[in-house]
Amino acid sequence: MDETVEMRRGRAEDAGAIRELTREAYARWVPLVGREPMPMVADYDEALKHHRFDLLYVGGVLAALIETVDEGDQLLIENVAVSPRFQGRGLGSQLMGHAETIACALGRTRLRLYTNKAMTGNVALYQKLGYRVDREAEGPPGFFRVHMSKALLTP
């Protein structure tokens, strides 16, 4: 089986594939949080106009993606999604490292992200990758987000 790993930037025509992958990746969280997480209902046609998407292919199949937003002084990781077929291979961690590379290339010294507090596995992974919890906040009503960040070394 071809396990060639390739990454490329997302384009407007990728919106459908991004939507499908994200829905598959986040489906397991629906019973835990009681609704579809925000990435499952996002407008990817619109997001592709304003955000950066990096798509990771394994053997020619879209396996994972990361969506980032340059906020001027820092880089926001808006979404990391790994297809259930490819989970457990370290692709999410690889994409998180890629976000650091993007941030450094843009001259940003900080990465930030947020996740649902109920997704404790995600919080633990981000902490393992060097992110710290900055705060917890409600939003949307009844759901709590954990806001996290990571300082990057400047050259």
Image (cartoon, rainbow, N blue to C red):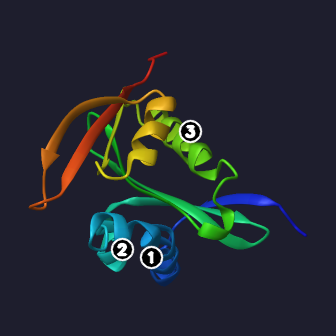
Sort mark 1 into few (<14), some (14-19) or many (20+) by Cα contacts within 10 Å: many
Q: CA distance from mark 1 to mark 3?
A: 23 Å
Do the residues under discs 2 and 1 have CB atoms within 8 angstroms? yes
Local SS, label 2 = helix
- Say which amino acid is labelled 2: Met
Q: Is residue 110 above or below residue 1?
A: above
Mark identifier at residue 4: none
Residue pictured at 64% horizontal, 52% vertical: 91
- Disc assigned to residue 97: 3
Question: What residue do we see at 67% from left, 69% from top?
Answer: 85
Q: Position of residue 124 (x, y in %)?
A: 45, 37
Secondary structure of residue under mark 1:
helix
Nearer the N terminus, badge 2 or badge 3? 2
Please name whichever residue, 46 or 89, is drawn nearer the observer in this view of the structure: 89
Amino acid found under the numbered disc labelled 1: Arg
- Which residue position holds label 2? 40
Which callout, 1 or 3, points to the residue nearer the camera?
Answer: 1
Residue 48 visible: no
Q: Nearer the viewer, mark 2 or mark 3?
A: 2
Q: Is residue 98 visible?
A: yes
Left or right, residue 6 beside residue 32 = right
Q: Quadrant of residue 39?
A: bottom left
From the image, tell me which residue sits under label 1.
23
Residue 52 placement, left or right of 134: right
Kind of element beneath mark 3: helix
Q: Residue at x 35, y 64 (%)?
A: 32
